[in-house]
Image (cartoon, rainbow, N blue to C red):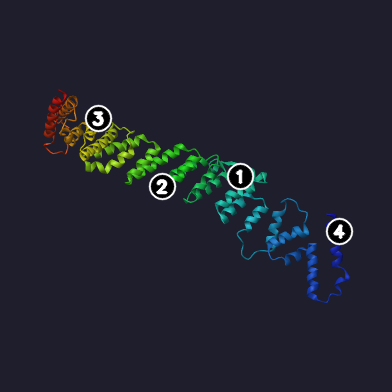
């Protein structure tokens, strides 16, 4: 302070000294005298010499109040400088600077939001609370009128929602949401549920987010939603895949029953082929009334029967016969499929050389055929689309096989 006062005294002496008498260049003389007046802090000269209110404002701290500490009085001085050097077209940063100088946190946030958007607001809060206890209290205080959350959490929630509006920035949003103690996780769950189910890449990103933040129940529900969506829109295999990932036994069993009914209308090879891939995908672990288990066994039987017809070997034929008996003995095989299965197996029942079925096995099939004949007389019996002579052909083949089996065992 003493050094500055001494320096000002020397400048004042220079201003009134005879040094200027030899200077005959008017512009030089006036320019130097103005420079001295600026260094002495002449307000009128400072106002004339500066082109912007910020220049005038800063010059006050350089030449008039060089030892100012803190923000006390800085806001009023800034307002005074703005009045002395008004701008022809106000800049968008003006109110932001005034808010910073006046330590008006709410004005700073409002101007950041208006001029720069939600990203600036979310991060400006970190700066505002770094060295100001008053701002820290204001921004971390919970407000009932905004759902019991703080201003800091509110602006982070807003920015997180902006990030989720585009699939390229969506994965960044949870970083902000998980820092919001009150509503962050619930909003994250809500936003995850709102993501479109038809985009597999986005779905995989969402599932990865669920894994990172241990949202297992949300992950399961998202996969269920995706599974149902794809199933309803004709992508059956994809729908089953996502339902399997979600381990939704209820819906898988429901699909299996639908599949079973579709295949069950006709068990011919042509109708079965279009569903075979889906049956394989579903697996046999889901057991809605045993329907899937039956369809898998039927698929295995058709394969072994085809091999027997192609190879014409005794081993292949025996394997097909064993597969047939497994189906006919299994309680999961519906009664309406007994005759189609036996009719498909006429090649096995009339196999040349030696019978493939023994007496006990043949009697079991004859009993099944008898049960079927009695059931056909009851109301509500579902008839098959087999030829009219199918029943007699099967009965004759079984009778012939029984005779051959008796002779074989004697």
Query: In the rendered image, which quarter is residue 203 located in?
Result: top left
> Dot 1: what SS?
helix
In the foreground, 278 or 243? 278
Q: Please tell me whether residue 128 is drawn above or below residue 312 in the rendered image.
A: below
Q: Do callouts 3 and 4 mark residues in contact (Cβ within 8 Å)?
A: no
* Spatial separation of the CA atoms under disc 3 and disc 4: 114 Å
Report the side of 3 relative to 334 (left or right).
right
Which residue lies under the disc numbered 2? 200
**Can you name the residue that lies furthest to the right here?**
18
The residue at 79%/72% (across/down) is 30
Tell us which disc is closer to us: 3 or 4: 3
Give the side of residue 348 with respect to residue 235, left or right.
Answer: left
Q: Are marks 1 and 4 in contact (CB under 8 Å)?
A: no
State the residue position of label 1.
139
Residue 272 screen position, x and y as percent: 24, 41
Quarter of the C terminus within the rendering: top left
Q: Please name the residue that numbered disc 3 is placed on.
A: 326
Mark 3 Cα-neighbour bin, 10 Å: few <14, some 14–19, many ≥20:
some
Classify 127 as above or below 362: below
Is 27 or 403 nearer to us in this picture? 403
- Judge whether residue 377 can be spotted in this image: no
Location of residue 14 in the rendering, given as x and y in whole percent from the top left corner: 86, 66
Of the image marks 2 and 3, the number of the one nearer the N terminus: 2
Of badges 1 and 4, nearer the viewer stands 4
Q: CA distance from mark 4 to mark 2?
A: 77 Å
């Amino acid at each position: 302070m003493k050094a500055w006062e001494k320096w000002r005294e020397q400048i004042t002496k220079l201003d009134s000294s005879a040094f200027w008498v030899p200077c005959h260049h008017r512009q030089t003389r006036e320019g130097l005298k103005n420079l001295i007046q600026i260094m002495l802090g002449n307000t009128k000269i400072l106002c004339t010499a500066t082109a912007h209110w910020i220049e005038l404002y800063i010059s006050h701290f350089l030449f008039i109040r060089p030892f100012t500490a803190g923000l006390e009085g800085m806001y009023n001085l800034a307002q005074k400088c703005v009045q002395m050097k008004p701008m022809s077209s106000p800049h968008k940063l003006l109110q932001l600077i005034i808010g910073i100088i006046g330590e008006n946190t709410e004005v700073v946030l409002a101007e950041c939001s208006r001029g720069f958007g939600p990203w600036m607001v979310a991060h400006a809060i970190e700066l505002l609370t770094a060295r100001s206890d008053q701002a820290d209290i204001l921004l971390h205080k919970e407000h009932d009128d905004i759902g019991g959350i703080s201003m800091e959490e509110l602006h982070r929630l807003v920015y997180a929602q902006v990030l989720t509006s585009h699939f390229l920035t969506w994965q960044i949003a949870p970083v902000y949401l998980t820092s919001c103690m009150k509503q962050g996780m619930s909003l994250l769950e809500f936003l995850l549920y709102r993501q479109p189910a038809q985009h597999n890449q986005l779905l995989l990103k969402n599932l990865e987010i669920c894994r990172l933040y241990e949202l297992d129940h949300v992950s399961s529900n998202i996969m269920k939603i995706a599974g149902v969506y794809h199933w309803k829109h004709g992508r059956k295999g994809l729908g089953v895949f996502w339902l399997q990932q979600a381990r939704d036994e209820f819906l898988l069993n429901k699909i299996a029953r639908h599949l079973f009914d579709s295949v069950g209308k006709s068990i011919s090879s042509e109708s079965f082929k279009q569903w075979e891939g889906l049956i394989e995908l579903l697996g046999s672990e889901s057991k809605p009334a045993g329907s899937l288990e039956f369809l898998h066994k039927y698929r295995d039987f058709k394969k072994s029967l085809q091999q027997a017809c192609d190879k014409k070997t005794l081993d292949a034929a025996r394997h097909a016969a064993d597969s047939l008996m497994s189906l006919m003995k299994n309680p999961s095989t519906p009664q309406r499929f007994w005759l189609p299965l036996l009719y498909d197996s006429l090649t096995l029942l009339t196999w040349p050389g030696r019978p493939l079925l023994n007496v006990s096995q043949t009697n079991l099939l004859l009993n099944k055929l008898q049960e079927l004949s009695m059931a056909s007389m009851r109301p509500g019996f579902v008839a098959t689309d087999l030829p009219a002579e199918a029943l007699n052909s099967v009965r004759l083949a079984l009778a012939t096989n029984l005779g051959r089996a008796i002779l074989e065992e004697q």
